[in-house]
Image (cartoon, helix red, strand yellow):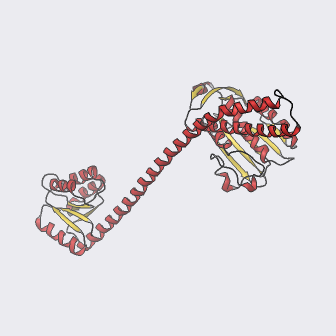
Amino acid sequence: MGNRILVVDDEKEVRTLLFRALTQMGGFQVELAETAEEALHRIEKEDFELVLTDLRLPGMDGLQLVSEIVRTKPAIITILLTGHATIDSALEAMKRGASDYLRKPVDLHEMIIRLRKALEERSRFVKLKELADNLEKSNQELRRLDEHKSEFISLASHELRTPLTIIKSQVQTVLDGKIGRMNKSQIEFLSTVESNIDRLIRLVKDLLDLSRIQTGKIEIRCEELDVIDLIHYILALFKVEADKKSISLKNEVPKGIGCIYADREKVERILINLIGNALKFTPEGGEILVSAQVLGGEGNDVVIGVRDSGIGIPDAELEKIFEKFHQVEESLSESAEGAGLGLAITKGLVEVHHGKIWAESEVGKGSVFSFTLPIFNRDSRSLSSSTI
């Protein structure tokens, strides 16, 4: 079945000629209208893919008809028929949304070729629109499922936190000998239980934090923070663990770098996550270096970097490491534990400060994670206390 075309022309001879050419030579289904008003009535009641209209019509002219079709039925292609002396009007019709124009006297073979081309373009457009609509529906469904997932994670985490805390308290009571003495095997067994409870509690906390970040319910309380003192404090927390692996911790933050304006607890969490990861993936005798510098240009941000001499990250993994629940492939991370939430949380905490985070790495040579935070100045106080 051919495409449906509506021909609009007030001259009967022209309508007849076009009808025969389009049906017999082109194989189209053709309907006829004498005026623009009649054409609009037909379009309202019937489905057409293309309207071929003369410029000069009684009452509403071809230009007005094109404008009205584009406004009310944008899926219908409009092509204007115009005489030699009215080429400017044809160009005006193109500006209003017409797909093409044909100059009188019409070459019938050329007309059919150009109409078919316009209809092919329309067909491609319709298919692309359908694909876009289906993609948008799929995206909406994914967003809905993601919202339900986040709600479930938040609810489950809240429900798990209290019983886990109670279980940990009871296990600790037994380990402290408050209900009687235990032998070595019993102590080792309960110590393993306690260790795994602690791991579950950390996982629940991470899930809650990630849920708050994703739903925009995380609260930040910014203050002036000295960069050198902050990094010195965080590195001190890891000294014992680093010494066990003979890993050198270096603070290469230059004097006079100044202060950042951020939530202390959140920034400490960022640094603890990054340095903790560096320790996991750096072999004995390696090195971890923390640096900071003011970015160029207007100098409104400080970039802090955590560099290690660890195993490195493959390029294919590098693009995914900030995704939630993502972990580096097993061959490179056999010694690492976790649910793959640390870097996703870290990224979220950086972004609530309007900062950016990125990673660079080379397998076998190490990685560097860098992130930006705002410098403290008079304009910083707009972030002082808010829920992002």
Quadrant of the image occupied by residue 124: bottom left
Query: Could one spot residue 207 in this view of the protein?
Result: yes
Q: In x, y percent, where is residue 245?
A: 86, 44
Quadrant assignment for the N terminus = bottom left
Quadrant of the image occupied by residue 116: bottom left
Query: Could one spot residue 296 in this view of the protein?
Result: no
Report the side of 211 relative to 292 (left or right). left
Towards the viewer: 115 or 378: 115
Quadrant of the image occupied by residue 114: bottom left
Image label count: 0
Towards the viewer: 76 or 215: 215
Q: Residue at x 23, y 56 (%)?
A: 89
Report the side of 291 relative to 97 (left or right). right
Q: In x, y percent, where is residue 348?
A: 62, 39
140 w.r.t. 2: above or below: above
Quadrant assignment for the C terminus = top right
Report the side of 18 relative to 276 (left or right). left
Outermost residue, front direction?
Answer: 180
Report the side of 188 relative to 126 (left or right). right
Q: Residue at x 16, y 57 (%)?
A: 56
Q: In x, y percent, where is residue 326?
A: 65, 49
